[in-house]
Image (cartoon, rainbow, N blue to C red):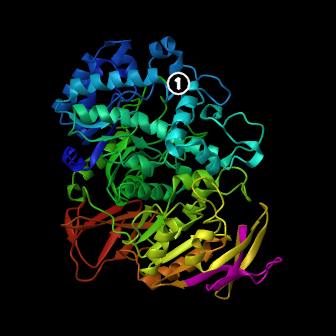
């Protein structure tokens, strides 16, 4: 199979193209405007099942043939979609079992999108037929660069309660546990007389009188992830058979909880995702986090931003418009964090349908003088200068542990504090590094941690077999491990690790947590660290030392004087435990000190709100400087190094200036 960089050996630039929404005379105009704007790649046919197969077994590819020919004639490659993201009316009308069933037992009706059940054999059969037809017809078309499978899996329907899903869930459980006795043990079914004698007694976790069995609920979430993943693999298998050299992908989403993207990424040739920061939120550091996460899903392989918007979306309460320069600025931030492609939803702003007010590369005016198109054209022209960045990797010495199953488990009901927000904890730690321009990778607890000097594990409630031993090896070999409160509590079935909290981590942390003290919403306390007082909220661990040293303590309450944070020498490294939710100043001070100890620093010193990001190839290093300020900034460059400003095509030394809301890309 071709590498992605062979299929698209340049910074991909373009967007979703929906020619089926327009008459044929518009297609030539589209291609000409794309060519002028520097577009080199578009996704086609994402929601076109209803016009490709107008009735069962009756296919019409004539319009798509023309579109692909026109695009190829204008030098534009195609991510050809499999069109399976939404079923046509005839399929829903003829086969009622295609529809997913909601928690109330009602089928989703036709008229929107993504209403199918992943476990419907009728849907799967129809998908296989359509995908094979597409693959066989376009296998040799020169415009075909990649396959875009389905679209944003589980975006609207992440759970299904149909009879097919119930039967599939039972089969899934049989494969996982082999015997009903093993399942009873793992789910703890002797509690509340939930014990099962037969697989057929097991139902889906829906419409229960009170608390759900946490082991069952966790497995249902795994099952739904696997059910949707199976759909993707069904399509991939056909595409691999017919077009073995064409890369495949599906597009991921922002902070998307239902699907384990680490799991999915194994079956993608390139990670792609859709980002829509809200302009009212200011600098989108949480989207920088997601860029880093997407880059990490395939061990640092660059990703493609498959969707963003030029101006404004249509689905928020108020859809603010990006002011001039912001689209370009955020696009370069994407590239700095590991993006090898900048794509948009969509090419031409729709005339009809639910997304007709969603911004596009070409607005309703169809004018080349529109602000949106002029900014698109500028960006397209600049990206042509960045071929040396394609495939460049991000050197990182810091990793943050991220685990989707942990996310599911820690936020399920029945916890000591039922307002814990896993993603918010991840963000709090990430922001310390973001503000310092320290590159961060995301890893799972079982991954190889040896490339890193520091590993952070915020609220890692679920510890699976081997995780603790991996942390011990990392720390013993000289690494610095930072773990936060409510970590190491339960196993992969949400059963408590016995032996005192956090049982699997006590060895590497040198402590025991006697009990938890959740805080009411309005409550706060004070902790003392290095003689300074800072606020803490949400939670307090009552820590008993077992070799660790207290580095911060609580100032008030009945546990006054007890450790709030600890440090423990383990082998050649050390571990730090933070037993509460401290204000940002504490994390900045503590983590900043740990970075200094490890001599981990940013590529360049920079003023606030300036990103300095590094990407390296075997031939070159690149600095991407993104100035989010409304004023010019100056940065000192490394002495004795001559840099090439790729956008200005000039050499510079000693200092570099970046204008307001502007970028510099330096190669050295």
Is most of the magenta stretch helix, strand or loop?
Answer: strand
Say which quadrant the C terminus sits in. Answer: bottom left
Left or right of 356 on screen, residue 247? left
Nearest the camera: 385 or 395?
395
Is 497 placed above or below 73 here? Answer: below
Question: Residue 397 sits in which quadrant?
Answer: bottom left
- Residue at 74% x, 81% y is 562
The residue at the point 23 percent across, 78 percent down is 641
Q: In this view, does 475 lie above or below 245?
A: below
Q: Name the residue under label 1.
A: 112
Secondary element at image label 1: loop
Residue 136, percent from left and from top: 22, 25
Seen as rendered, the residue at the extreme bottom is 531
Q: Position of residue 253 (x, y in %)?
A: 47, 45
Q: In this view, does 443 lie above or below 188?
A: below
> Residue 592: x, y in percent?
51, 79
Examine the structure image and report whether residue 492 is included in the region drawn in magenta: no
Q: Residue at x 18, y 29 (%)?
A: 141
Measured as percent of width and height from the top left, residue 178 is found at 52, 43
* Label 1: how many Cα within 10 Å (few below 14, some 14–19, many 20+): few
In magenta, the rendered stretch is: 539-568
Query: On the rendered image, what quadrant is the N terminus found in?
Result: top left
Q: Considering depth in this image, is 131 or 286 the residue closer to the camera? A: 131
Q: Please report the residue visible at 20 percent of the width from the left and 27 percent of the height from the top.
A: 70
Would residue 75 appear left or right of 297 to someone viewing this image? Answer: left
Q: In which quarter of the image is residue 231?
A: top left
């Amino acid at each position: 199979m071709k590498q992605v960089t062979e299929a698209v050996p340049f910074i991909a630039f373009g967007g979703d193209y929906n020619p089926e929404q327009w008459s044929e005379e518009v297609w030539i105009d589209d291609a000409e405007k794309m060519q002028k704007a520097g577009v080199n790649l578009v996704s086609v046919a994402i929601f076109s099942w209803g016009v490709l197969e107008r009735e069962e077994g009756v296919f019409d590819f004539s319009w798509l043939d023309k579109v692909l020919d026109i695009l190829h004639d204008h030098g534009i490659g195609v991510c050809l979609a499999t069109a399976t993201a939404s079923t046509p009316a005839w399929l829903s009308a003829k086969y009622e079992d295609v529809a997913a069933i909601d928690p109330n037992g009602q089928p989703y009706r036709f008229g929107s999108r993504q209403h199918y059940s992943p476990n419907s054999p009728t849907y799967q059969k129809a998908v296989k037929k359509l995908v094979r037809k597409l693959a066989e017809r376009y296998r040799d078309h020169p415009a075909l660069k990649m396959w875009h499978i389905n679209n944003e899996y589980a975006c609207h329907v992440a759970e299904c309660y149909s009879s097919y899903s119930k039967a599939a869930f039972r089969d899934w459980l049989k494969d996982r546990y082999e015997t009903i006795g093993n399942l009873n043990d793992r789910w703890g079914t002797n509690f509340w007389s939930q014990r099962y004698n037969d697989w057929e007694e097991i139902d889906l976790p829906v419409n229960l009188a009170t608390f759900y069995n946490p082991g069952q609920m966790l497995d249902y979430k795994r099952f739904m992830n696997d059910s949707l993943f199976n759909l993707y693999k069904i399509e991939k298998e056909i595409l691999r058979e017919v077009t073995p050299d064409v890369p495949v992908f599906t597009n991921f989403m922002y902070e998307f909880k239902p699907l384990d993207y680490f799991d999915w990424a194994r079956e993608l040739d390139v990670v792609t995702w859709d980002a829509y920061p809200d302009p009212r939120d200011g600098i989108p550091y949480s989207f920088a986090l997601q860029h880093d996460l997407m880059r990490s899903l395939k061990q640092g392989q660059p990703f493609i931003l498959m969707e963003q918007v030029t101006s404004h979306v249509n689905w928020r309460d108020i859809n603010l418009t990006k002011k001039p320069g912001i689209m370009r600025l955020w696009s370069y931030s994407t590239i700095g964090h590991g993006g090898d492609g900048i794509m948009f939803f969509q090419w031409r702003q729709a005339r009809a349908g639910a997304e007709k007010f969603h911004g596009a590369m070409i607005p309703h005016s169809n004018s080349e003088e529109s602000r949106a198109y002029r900014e698109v054209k500028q960006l397209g022209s600049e990206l042509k200068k960045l071929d040396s960045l394609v495939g460049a990797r991000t050197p990182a010495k810091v990793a943050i542990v991220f685990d989707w199953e942990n996310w599911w488990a820690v936020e399920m009901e029945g916890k000591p504090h039922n307002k814990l927000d896993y993603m918010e904890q991840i963000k709090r730690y990430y922001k310390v590094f973001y503000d310092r321009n320290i590159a961060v990778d995301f890893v799972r607890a079982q991954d190889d941690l040896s490339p890193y000097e520091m590993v952070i594990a915020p609220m890692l409630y679920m510890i699976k077999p081997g995780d603790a031993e991996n942390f011990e090896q990392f720390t013993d070999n000289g690494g610095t491990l930072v773990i936060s409160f409510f970590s190491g509590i339960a196993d992969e079935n949400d059963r408590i690790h016995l032996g005192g909290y956090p049982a699997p981590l006590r060895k590497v942390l040198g402590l025991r947590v006697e009990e938890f003290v959740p805080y009411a919403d309005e409550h706060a306390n004070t902790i003392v660290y290095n003689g300074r007082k800072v606020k803490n909220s949400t939670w307090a661990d009552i820590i008993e030392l077992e070799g660790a040293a207290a580095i911060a303590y609580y100032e008030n309450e009945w546990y006054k004087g007890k450790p709030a944070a600890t440090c423990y020498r383990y082998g050649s490294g050390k571990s730090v435990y933070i037993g509460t939710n401290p204000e940002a100043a504490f994390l900045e001070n503590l983590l900043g000190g740990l970075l200094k100890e490890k001599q981990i620093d940013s590529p360049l010193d920079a003023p606030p709100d300036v990103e300095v990001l590094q990407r390296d190839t075997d031939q070159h290093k690149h600095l991407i400087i993104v100035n989010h300020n409304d004023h010019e900034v100056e940065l000192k460059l490394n002495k004795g190094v001559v840099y090439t400003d790729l956008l200005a095509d000039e050499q510079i030394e000693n200092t570099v200036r970046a204008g307001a809301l502007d970028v510099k890309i330096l190669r050295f």
